[in-house]
Image (cartoon, rainbow, N blue to C red):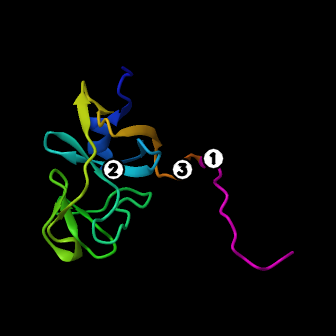
C-alpha cells in the first residue's frame, strides 16, 4: 500500500485560512478540494457551492463571514466543520467532503476515492502562465 500523500500542514491551513488542491477519482474525473480550519484540525470540501457549482476558492483563498465559508455568487454560507448551509440559495445542503487526516501536524489525503494530483486549481499545472487571446484582430 502506498503512503498517503501529505498535502500541507495544519498550521499552514490555520495561518492562511485555506488550501486548494486537485484530485482525480477512479474514473479520472478531476475535482478541486479546499482545506479549511476547524476546531480539531482541518476539514476538506469540494470547491464548489451546492447551489450553482460556483467555486468557493477562485484562486485567492476562501472567503469567510463570521467563521463560515461564503459563496461569493449568492452569499450562502457553509459551516467550516460541518459543510452545512442553513441560509440563502444553497439552504439545507451540505458540501461534499473529502477524507483527510491530521498526522503529526501534517494533513494527509486518506480518501480511497481520490488520488492527489497537485496543489492548486485544476488548470494550475499546465505551466503556461500566458493568457490566451480570443481577439479576432490580426497583426
> Looking at the magenta stretch, what is its main secondary structure?
loop
Q: Residues within 10 Å of mark 2 (few under 14, many from 20)?
A: many
In the image, 61 versus 120, the foreground residue is 120
Q: Which residue corresponds to the image point at 47% horizontal and 45% vertical from the top-left?
A: 28
Residue 128 among those drawn in magenta: yes
Q: Which mark is residue 124?
A: 3
Is label 1 in a helix, a strand or a loop? loop
Q: Which residue is mark 2?
A: 34
Total marks placed: 3
Q: Is residue 127 left or right of residue 8?
A: right
Query: Is the residue 34 above or below the residue 71 in the image?
Result: above
Q: Which secondary structure, mark 3?
A: helix
Q: Is residue 84 above or below residue 111?
A: below
Please report contact status of discs 3 and 2: CB closer than 8 Å, yes or no. no
Residue at image location 12% in from the left, 68% down from the top: 86
**Residue 93, position in %: x, y?**
18, 65
User: Do the numbered discs 1 and 3 sit on residues whose CB atoms are within 8 Å?
Assistant: no
Instruction: Identify the secondary structure beneath mark 2.
Output: strand
Q: Is residue 71 above or below residue 22?
A: below
Mark 1 highlights which residue?
A: 127
Q: Position of residue 75 (x, y in %)?
A: 26, 74
Q: Which residues are magenta?
A: 126-139
Badge 2 or badge 1: first in the primary sequence: 2
Amino acid at each position: 500500500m502506498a503512503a498517503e500523500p501529505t498535502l500541507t500542514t495544519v498550521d499552514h491551513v490555520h495561518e492562511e485560512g485555506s488550501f486548494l488542491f486537485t484530485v482525480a477519482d477512479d474514473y479520472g474525473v478531476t475535482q478541486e478540494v479546499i482545506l479549511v480550519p476547524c476546531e480539531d484540525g482541518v476539514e476538506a470540501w469540494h470547491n464548489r457551492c451546492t447551489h450553482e457549482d460556483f467555486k468557493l476558492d477562485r484562486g485567492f483563498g476562501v472567503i469567510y463571514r463570521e467563521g463560515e465559508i461564503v459563496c461569493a455568487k449568492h452569499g450562502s454560507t457553509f459551516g467550516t466543520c460541518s459543510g452545512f448551509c442553513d441560509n440563502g440559495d444553497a439552504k439545507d445542503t451540505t458540501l461534499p467532503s473529502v477524507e483527510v487526516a491530521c498526522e503529526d501536524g501534517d494533513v494527509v489525503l486518506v480518501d480511497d476515492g481520490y488520488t492527489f494530483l497537485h496543489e492548486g486549481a485544476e488548470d494550475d499545472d499546465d505551466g503556461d502562465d500566458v493568457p490566451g487571446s480570443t481577439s479576432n484582430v490580426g497583426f
